[in-house]
Image: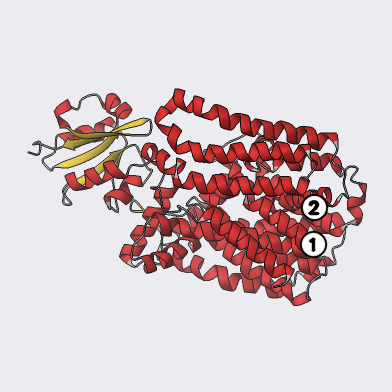
Amino acid sequence: MSKNQRYFLHLTVLSVLLYFPGLGGRDFWAPVEPRYAEIARVMFENGEWLVPRVNGEIYSDKPILYFWLVLIGSAFAGEVNEWTVRLPAALGGVGFVLATYLVGRDLLSAKTGWIGATVLGTTGRVIWEARWAHVDTLFCFFFTLSIYFGARALLGWGKPHEILYAYPCMALATLAKGLIGAVLPGLIFLGFMLARRDWGLLKALRLPLGMPLYCLIAAPWFWLVNNATGGQWLRDFIYIHHLQRYTAGAGHEQPFYYYLRTLPLDFLPWTVFALPALWAYRPYGGIKRDPVALFLIAWFFAVVLFFTASDTKRDLYLMPAFPPVALFVGTYIDDLASGRIAQDAVFRTSAFIFYHLLWITALVAPAIAWWLRWEMIGSGLVPLACVLAGGVAGVAMVARRKPAALYRATALMMLATTVAASFSILPAINAYKSSRSFAVLVRNTVPESATLYVYADTMNDFNFYTRRDVLPILKSKQQVQNLLSQNEAAYMLVKDRDLKRIGTIPVERIIARDQIGSDHWNLVFLGPKLPA
């Protein structure tokens, strides 16, 4: 087995162990997971492959690729469930890691690519997104592949025709998340050309061939869904979820420095290497003469600046910028291990502080859990033991000046902690996050012929677990009063705080209640005669 094959196998095994154990071991947690699950359930049960809908409304937030993959997995499983809905995210996580390795292998070295891909795969944000029903790891997989083929063409390391492989990847990235599947690669390639001041590189992109290829793959579904919805899907997709979200915030407004705050946290535990690396490689005057470094810098800043300029900011939006950061850290770790860079005071001090904080946190956490939720202590002991061991090992490796062993211990800690948490902490938290048990009670209580309303809530978890395609939403006290005076029996799901605002519902009409997280939910009978 060649070194390249061995690295590829190692990364595949690592990412599968990180992202797959216990993938279906917890229920869907609001807000996004139940929404994706309900969209897939409705499509699966209706044999629908074209128009995504949720609670009776056209869903135009995300394109179709993620749901297609869920439907394929559900066809084998026989149903839409927690495992099949999260499967595309886990597969996307594996692909994201392997695509990062390919970039590092071809632009830097096989070993640096291997270390960098390991770093990326074991960051807290990537682990979380790969185990959550989100489109972002799937998007990042195809996005990174498109950058890989683009880099080979622009840097002259591949055959000229390889750039044409980037366009199908951009099309699939677009079908996964939206037009940023083409916009972000375009900005990166443009930024690299500006940095090199070489507009002759435009020829290497082969736009007259590439753009038709992109449209051939991406356009058919957009055209079909637009026709099937009378133009509504594409209109909402472009205006609300692209233009308006980018310029008007869409509920996620943040200050311009937001990503300076979130990126170091999302990249943990490897931030402890990234910050000293910035110090170690100064001065940066030689970067202008290094096309690979320029390309990776253009990649990082194109993504960061694009999302910084947006009024809508979310921490996970920066995941497309993770590969160049991970490869930068991989280069630093490799240089430390080989002795090409000295272990200076900045690295040693920051590492000592960080790994001491790890084992101290692991020891203190049970006391905090006892104070907040004592019943959670048992479920956290094994994951905390993994963090404790990782912190102690980290301190020892820093003291012994063994950066390669420190890197391996950190990656192993993340793997062990993730696997342990997937079978202990997450199922324990599930009791506080899941609406399944109450929804099943509601499903068994409310006749199928009766209408079930929900008051001022759009999380879709009750849709999925009650198996109701539509839960009409009541938005005002007057609507509830109208239903109370009608002759037709109906039911309403309502939180305690909203029940107090309505204020005129007799206690005897509350036929079931339960606590989900910090919210108390009630099943209220609406109609002329209480059920026996």
- Mark 1 crowd level (few <14, some 14–19, many ≥20, 10 Å Cα): some
Q: Above or below — where is 188 with respect to 277?
A: below
Per the rendering, the mark at residue 334 is 2
Q: Can you give x and y, in whole percent of width and height, for residue 398 in the image?
A: 76, 39
Give the structural element (helix, strand or loop) at label 1: loop
Mark 1 = which residue? 109
At label 2, which amino acid type do we have? Asp
- Displayed quadrant of residue 483: top left
Q: Residue at x 83, y 51 (%)?
A: 335
56 horizontally vs 478: left or right: right
Please identify the quadrant where the C terminus is shown.
top left
483 horizontally vs 313: left or right: left
Please identify the quadrant where the N terminus is shown.
bottom right
Mark in the foreground, 2 or 1: 2
Tell which of 496 and 202 is nearer to you. 496
Q: Above or below — where is 413 with respect to 349?
A: below
